[in-house]
Amino acid sequence: MSEFTTIEKQAMKTSPCYGAIVQWKERVFVTDMDRYGKYTAKIYEMVDLEDAPSRIEARLSLIKEADESFPDSGHAIKWCFKQD
């Protein structure tokens, strides 16, 4: 089963100091710090962009999540770019 969210919802869940949300083409990369001080990485795909009122309200489907953690958000986003 796919997890659906939006950029808007991810922005409310992501730490403004440690997290990052990057839209690239029809993909959205999300990173944030976990409770151990390491960074996570997730890749979402926009699935209903043409029907959404705005890009931040388009539904996102989780397509990949890193099994590893990263020392910072830059390395986490770098991982996302390498997956595409």
Image (cartoon, grey):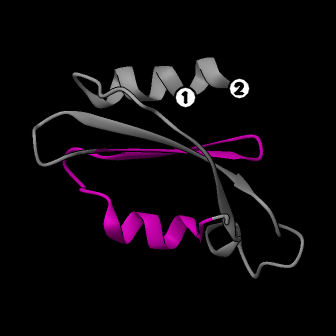
Q: Marks 1 and 2, Cα distance to the nearest angstrom? A: 7 Å
- Give 73 or 38, whichever is nearer the viewer: 38
Tags 1 and 2 in contact by the CB under 8 Å rule? yes
Q: Quadrant of the N terminus?
A: bottom right
Examine the rendered structure and indicate whether residue 53 appears above or below residue 12: below
Residue 62, picture quadrant = bottom right
Examine the rendered structure and indicate whether residue 37 appears above or below residue 72: below
Q: Quadrant of the C terminus?
A: top right
Local SS, label 2: loop
* Residue 84 appears left or right of 6: right
Residue beneath disc 1: 80
Please give the name of the residue rendered at 78% of the width and 78% of the height, measured from the top-left corner: 52
* Number of the label disc, if any, that sits on residue 84: 2
Residue 32 locus on image (x, y percent): 30, 46
What amino acid is labelled 1 in the image? Cys
Residue 77 locus on image (x, y percent): 46, 29
Tag 1: Cα neighbours inside 10 Å, few (<14), some, or many (≥20)?
Answer: many
* Residue 73 appears left or right of 6: left
Please give the name of the residue rendered at 36% of the width and 20% of the height, measured from the top-left corner: 75
* Residue 74 appears left or right of 56: left
Which region of the structure is painted magenta? 3-32
Residue 83 locus on image (x, y percent): 64, 23
